[in-house]
Image: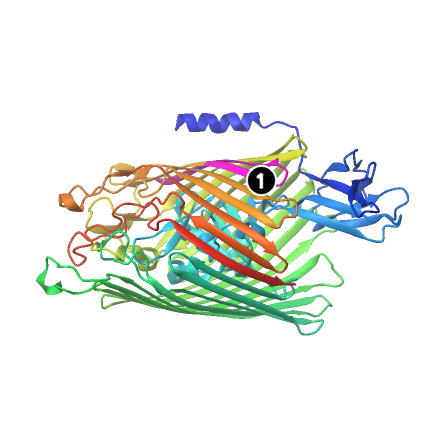
Amino acid sequence: MRLVIKIFLTVILFINISFAQTLKGFVYELNEKNQKVPLVGTNLYWLNTQLGTTSDENGYFELKKFKSENQSELKLVVSYIGYKPDTLNISDDMDSIEVVLSINRELSEVVVTAASLSKFIDELDVKQTEVITSKELLKAACCNLAESFTTNASVDVQFQDAVIGAKQIQLLGLAGTYTQMMFENIPTLKGIGSTFGLNYVPGPWMTAISISKGASSVVNGYESITGQINIDYKKPDDVERFYFNAFQSSHYKTDLNANLSLQLNENLSTILLAHTDFITKTFDDDQDSFKDQPNVKQFNFFNRWKYNSLQGFESQFGVQVLNEERNGGQLRPTSSLNPDYQNKLYEININTKRLELFTKNGYVFNDEPYSSIGLILNAQRHQQNSLFGLRKYDADQKTFYANLLFTKEDEDNIHSVTLGASYVFDQYEEKFNGLDYFRKESRPGLFAEYKYAPTNLISVVPGLRFDFHNIYGTFFTPRIHLKINPDENTTLRVSAGKGYRSVNLFADNLNYLASSRQFILINQPTYEEAWNYGFNITHYLTIGYRDLRLTADFYRTDFIKQTVVDIDSDIRQVRFFNLSGKSYSNSYQIELGYELLKRLDVTAAFRYTDVRTQIGNQILTKPLVSRYKTLVTVSYANEERDWLFDSSFLLNGPGRVPSTSVNPVNYQVEDRFKSYLNINAQITKKVNYFDIYFGVENLTNFKQKNPIIAPDDPFGNYFDASLIWGPIDGRKFYFGLRMSIM
């Protein structure tokens, strides 16, 4: 631990004042043979500034980006004697371009080839926000949200148990229930929908994923404790008119996606997104009589509309419908020690129906161009019927969300304020083993957020909100974010804030139903409360005409009130009780990103987490979680960019497993697991409108041995499929075809 801290502090001290984020590229002209020839001495400068440069003898240039928070794109002027000057729009995530000037001595045509970053830190956001673009999502088998973080060091994804196929994210070392999931700033996939929610978001639907660590904005509610993950879907007015994707894996998973967008008139457009996936074949490679993966059949449709009055009013609205059947469990009965269950199959059946409607409306005041008002409405219905052997769990959740907000900025963007009111209603009806659980939560809220940015060097955003919960009383949520640019090369962010969440006992712990553990409620679960604070520093260095990006951060979460899930005290029980003592999480992370050679991008990251909770007189580390993670990703494209090669190397550190020493010897597992390596790779070939891709996951074929305890006696006292810390799937090959028509 001391060594990690020393390394962390050494890196921070190493960061000095040396380089800024830059735009780089080449300027060419075409000769009589239509060949590219470097154009020497081309003038390039940012519009309305004195910041500029000229291209060298190779046509190469690099220009420090001019930060201006009141515009979404930079404007680059390209000028050369005898050529007509032209102005190019440069987006914030664009790091390199290629400009080709025609030979006719008039700049009648400029061809710009841009190599935008596939993932980047949002430099304008006061919060630390990492954006994963659709370009990054194509580097792996991104069939759904659960598979979208393969190349991301901040977010972990692992199976919740060995039988139901559900995956859960972890951020800052804590379960995904402490991370607020958002669909374009609308809270979603919570409560009952959180267990399988990652499977409900198809990869081809997404255009970007924004990951914000630590305390987030108060505008979206009080539920983010470790951070927010905000998902952007494809929109009707995107350039893509038609899209099709077909995916097939060697584990018999089939995915089909089709998107169609239409511009009906100058005001109205729509897009239909359709997804289906199947796992129809069953297999049992480890010969434990249980399906290695459940059979799945999912149908998922999303239709959204966009209306723009062209006079200040804009509206988006849509509906999503999902139906999923998931069947797992035993392939063949085993001779149970209990005669009542002789030759009886241990079955797992989970059927889900989900309906979601939303509308987002905004108006910009014509007489006050820096003032706007917005209204967001969302309604969700989530039904789930589940059977785990002898245990039956049925749930029905109804949710309504409304958020009204008013934003006012001054002309110089020094001051801005957001005021608003929200209302959230959740109704839960749950039935577990014949017992009924019913809960209604109603919580109106008020919030205010102020931004002060006197210069480009400093921005501060304090915010607070009051929510009036019908069961738990008033929640007061203060949060603050600070961004400092000590120089144009370095950005320092600091954040602190409080968060709350209601506990959903069964939905949050559905994985323990796949075991013989008894649910013991020592205290009735209510809500959880925690502080989160941390800092992030981003710095750029120049090495060989290229930017080296270095980021380092530290975040700590301290729980004031928590429902402790204790699976250590008794291997045959899962106990729930209120925290009495300490519970915290420390997360340290360092990441480097660099274009090692032309079109060869490499990132390397190391993260160390320390998560501990007091149980009785002991402060125990969180079980089934790797203490550290090392991730290296490598991406290469040939000069024509029609061959793409992507790979990731993930080293997961060791961790702790709850003791099974009281079990019979043949039902015991080791109390610790060792570090293991996971390698993924993919090759993509672009041909006109088509992308053909082939890849492999878990190349080393590493699998957790005996992931199910007592599979030969699933109705007995020792059966447990919940102690999962590593991969349960072996090596998986896949191939696919994408077609996109603009």
Q: Secondary structure at mark 1?
A: strand
**Relative horizontal placement of residue 184, taking residue 239 as reference (left or right):** left
Quadrant occupied by the C terminus: bottom right
Q: Is residue 499 magenta?
A: no
When the figure is inspected, residue 368 is found, relative to residue 633, above or below; the finding is: below
Q: Nearer the viewer, residue 739 or 262?
A: 739
Magenta-highlighted residues:
583-606
What residue is pinned by disc 1? 601
Task: Give the residue type at disc 1.
Answer: Asp
**Residue 588, magenta (yes or no):** yes
Residue 412 visible here: yes
User: Residue 444, how many percent across, how many down?
Assistant: 48, 62
The residue shown at (50%, 59%) is: 445
User: Where residue 431 sits in the image (x, y, percent)?
Assistant: 28, 67
> Which of the pair 380/337 is nearer the observer?
337
Left or right of 142, for residue 267: right
